[in-house]
Amino acid sequence: MTANGDQDLQSQVNALREQLGSLQKDVTRLNDIQDIRTLHFKYGYYWDNVLYEQWIDLFTDDVKVRSHADTHANIALLSWGTVPWQRRGS
């Protein structure tokens, strides 16, 4: 190969690397969007179907939840005995 041919090959490789990096970012973004949609679906499904244990598991352990009386600093406090969950319209 000539020096010019090596440069052309190297520029093609560099272009492919850039394209690969861009595609990886796109795939990551699309996966993140799908994860958010799935979480949103689960949130509504669990709540609407009175699956409160599964609903609570969607949150981190250090989530803060405001109730009528106070703010609970730990999701573990959200048990049936501590916060009386009710479906809307009940």
Image (cartoon, rainbow, N blue to C red):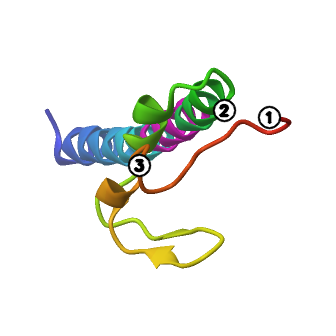
Q: Position of residue 52 (x, y in %)?
A: 49, 34
Asked whether residue 16 is drawn in magenta, I would say: no
Which residue is the site of mark 2?
A: 44
Q: Residue at x 57, y 27 (%)?
A: 46
Q: Quadrant of the C terminus?
A: top right
The amino acid sitting under disc 1 is Ser
**Which residue is more in the foreground, 41 or 6?**
41
Find the distance from the CA under tag 3 to the CA under tag 1. 18 Å
- Circle 3/circle 1 CB separation < 8 Å: no
Query: Is tag 2's residue or tag 1's residue first in the polypeptide sequence?
Result: 2
Query: Crowding at label 3, few (<14), some or many (≥20) Cα neighbours within 10 Å?
Result: few
Q: Give how far across and how far down residue 58 sits, in percent.
A: 42, 42
**To which residue does mark 1 refer?**
90
Labels 2, 1: front one:
1
Residue occupied by mark 3: 81
The crowd level at tag 1 (other Cα within 10 Å; few <14, some 14-19, many 20+) is few
